[in-house]
């Protein structure tokens, strides 16, 4: 029997495994990097062991350090979570060689399926060799790992070389393995997967389907179980293929077999030899705890011959610290407040006051809703997210709500190109026009008519805010009856609550301020100074860092004075395990280069200046 378990991971998945361990009476051990010293997973574990360093390569990808931590902490088992070393056969062997229980499939099964190229060969599918015009579009894909990293869609042959190079670099950084391959890219297919659970006694359960078609950068955003609208015959085929893949490698434990479904046909993608991020939707509809089942299987217990039956529908949305309207740029900073209302499952690795850093994945949490029908689950999750209190960096919360309420998704007509078609509409600014006034009135609460203000008391007071990328100026007055503003009736104005009557309807605005950042209900504003700072403007052609990150690569031969073409890649930033390309805005000359490889930059930092030729 397992008594002490180390999770070789961080964040949300570590916290999720620890919850099950607590229910089973198993002592827990966390590992943490220097960047995660105060992270939630390190705080909630019974014991925590430091991995010196901050980058994944120095810490969570160091299998030798993780095994050493498990032994020194007295653990007798290791759970890999997902990502990092979860699909690393050498790490699994190292755990077993240390006399520890491995909560996962045999190393030989991991090895057989860890490389997507070898997995396809096992299923009788060969990757593309030399790519020709007739093969386009194609997908460049990392052979190891997952999560959308090391993937590039190529639609023109001249883009293939750069896509291969970029995918190799990103895969090597994320997984320690730069092998990539090329396969046909199927447009408008659905990403459908089958959860499997197998024991060491020959029983394999196919635990339903999941639809994971809503993706950005080939990384899943919204998942649901069961996959809606699949014909019964296709579902049976998916089950059979999933069981076949598991039996082909004598699989043990929880795993996922992924497919692309198009024109009523299933195309095998890969087998993930680990727990998936989206496993909670399967747990909800089958009424089981997959982590508990993983542990029981690792202890040698046999599964019942018959799998449990599914009931109802579950939908999961991944909440990311990112800006979907600006190329999904990851965001960092303090997460001041995160609270989801209602009977929604929230899996997270953060609590109020935690810092979101640059070294790891941008996912803050997963919100999961379960209901008897898909329509009810959709409504439940959208409503909960719409009413979530979320104070901190920009997130994809509004995008999630709009996606869940989109007619195409509601009708289950989505595919992997959903965001390619609808992103502009889904990210259109929709900030509350009365939010700046509510912020100003809350700020004015408690001030005297003259104290703290340079405006004459008989004149309207003025406040400026940045909201949804635009500047808004609001005016109000201090009168005998209190604060007043044109066009609305101020029912109440307090420091945290403002009530305005607009067209005869009373509206409540909860206002919270953190420095210059102001949250009014679900709208985020930045308070601007009363008098703009007369600083010199940036030179035309200035390239600013769109996110915090590290400069990991420069274009070959890039130097000040070099000619560049519009759209030419100049450098690559890495943040939260993803690489972002910085391109020349115009054709001209690189007049300034302010950064070097290895340098960390903050959002808005000047990277370079491209000077266009004079007319």
Image (cartoon, helix red, strand yellow):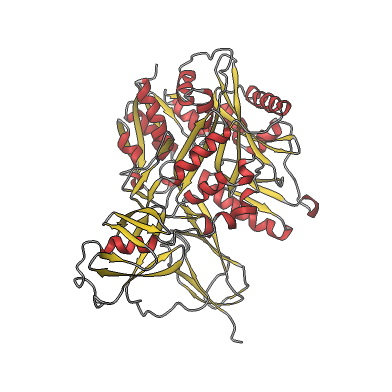
The residue drawn where x is 47% and y is 24% is 289
Quadrant location of the C terminus in the rendered image: bottom right
Q: Seen from this angle, which residue lies furthest front? A: 504
Quadrant location of the N terminus in the rendered image: top left
Which quadrant would residue 233 be assigned to in this image? top right
**Viewer can see residue 563:** yes
Residue 74 at what x, y percent from top left? 32, 26
Residue 612 at what x, y percent from top left? 58, 80
Q: Seen from this angle, which residue lies furthest bottom? A: 615
Looking at the picture, does residue 202 appear above or below residue 268?
above
Looking at the picture, does residue 126 appear above or below residue 561?
above
Looking at the picture, does residue 161 appear above or below residue 14?
below
The residue drawn where x is 37% and y is 79% is 535
Q: Nearer the viewer, residue 107 or 606?
A: 606
Residue 497 at what x, y percent from top left? 30, 54
Q: Nearer the viewer, residue 29 or 503?
A: 503
Q: How many marks?
A: 0
Which quadrant would residue 583 be assigned to in this image? bottom right
Horizontal relation, residue 472 to residue 462: left or right: right
Which quadrant would residue 7 be assigned to in this image? top left
The residue drawn where x is 34% and y is 40% is 40
**Viewer can see residue 83:** no
Q: Seen from this angle, which residue lies furthest right? A: 134
Looking at the picture, does residue 282 appear above or below residue 348?
above
The residue drawn where x is 19% and y is 71% is 451
């Amino acid at each position: 029997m397992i008594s002490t378990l180390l999770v070789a991971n961080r964040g949300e998945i570590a916290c999720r495994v620890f919850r099950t361990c607590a229910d089973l009476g198993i002592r827990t051990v966390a590992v943490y990097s220097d960047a995660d010293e105060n992270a939630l997973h390190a705080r909630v574990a019974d014991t925590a062991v430091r991995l010196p360093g901050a980058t994944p390569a120095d810490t969570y990808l160091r299998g030798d350090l993780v095994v050493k931590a498990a032994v020194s902490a007295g653990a007798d088992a290791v759970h890999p979570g997902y990502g990092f070393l979860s699909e690393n056969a050498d790490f699994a062997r190292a755990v077993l060689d240390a006399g520890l229980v491995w909560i996962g499939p045999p190393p030989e099964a991991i090895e057989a399926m860890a490389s997507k190229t070898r997995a396809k060969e096992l299923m009788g599918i060969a990757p593309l060799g030399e790519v020709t015009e007739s093969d386009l579009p194609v997908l460049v894909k990392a052979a190891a790992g997952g999560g959308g990293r090391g993937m590039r869609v190529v639609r023109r042959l001249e883009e293939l070389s750069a896509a291969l190079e970029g995918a190799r670099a990103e895969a090597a950084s994320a997984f320690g393995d730069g092998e990539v391959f090329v396969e046909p890219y199927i447009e408008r297919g659905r990403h459908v997967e089958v959860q499997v659970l197998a024991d060491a006694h020959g029983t394999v359960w196919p635990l339903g389907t999941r639809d994971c078609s809503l993706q950005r950068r080939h990384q899943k955003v919204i998942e649901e179980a069961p996959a809606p609208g699949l014909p019964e015959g296709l579902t049976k085929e998916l089950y059979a293929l999933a069981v076949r893949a598991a039996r082909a490698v004598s699989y043990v434990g929880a795993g996922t077999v992924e497919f692309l479904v198009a024109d009523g046909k299933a195309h095998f993608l890969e087998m993930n030899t680990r727990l998936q991020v989206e496993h909670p939707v399967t747990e909800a509809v089958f009424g089981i705890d997959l982590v508990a089942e993983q542990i029981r299987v690792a202890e040698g217990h046999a599964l019942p011959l018959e799998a449990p039956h599914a009931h109802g529908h579950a939908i999961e949305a991944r909440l990311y610290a990112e800006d979907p309207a600006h190329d999904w740029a990851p965001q960092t900073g303090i997460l001041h407040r995160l609270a989801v209302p209602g009977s929604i499952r929230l899996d997270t690795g953060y609590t109020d006051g935690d810092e979101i850093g640059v070294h790891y994945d941008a996912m803050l949490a997963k919100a999961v809703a379960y209901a008897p029908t898909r329509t009810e689950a959709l409504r439940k999750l959208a409503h909960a997210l719409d009413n979530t209190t979320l104070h901190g960096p920009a997130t994809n919360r509004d995008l999630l709500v709009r996606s869940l309420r989109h007619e195409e998704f509601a009708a289950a007509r989505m595919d992997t190109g959903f965001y390619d078609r609808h992103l502009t509409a889904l990210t259109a600014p929709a900030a509350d026009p009365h939010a700046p006034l509510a912020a100003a009135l809350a700020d004015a609460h408690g001030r005297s008519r003259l104290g703290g203000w340079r405006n004459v008391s008989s004149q309207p007071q003025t406040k400026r805010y940045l909201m949804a990328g635009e500047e808004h100026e609001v005016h109000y007055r201090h009168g005998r009856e209190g604060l007043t503003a044109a066009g609305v009736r101020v029912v109440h104005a307090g420091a945290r609550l403002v009530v305005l009557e607009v067209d005869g309807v009373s509206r409540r605005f909860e206002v919270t301020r953190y420095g210059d950042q102001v949250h009014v209900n679900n709208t985020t504003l930045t308070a601007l100074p009363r008098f703009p700072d007369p600083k010199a403007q940036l030179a035309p052609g200035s390239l600013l860092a769109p996110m915090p990150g590290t400069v990991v690569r420069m274009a070959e031969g890039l130097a000040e004075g070099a000619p560049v073409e519009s759209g030419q890649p100049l450098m690559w930033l890495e943040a939260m395990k993803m690489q972002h390309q910085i391109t020349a805005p115009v054709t001209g000359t690189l007049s300034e280069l302010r950064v070097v490889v290895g340098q960390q930059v903050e959002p808005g930092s000047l990277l370079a200046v491209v000077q266009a030729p004079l007319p």
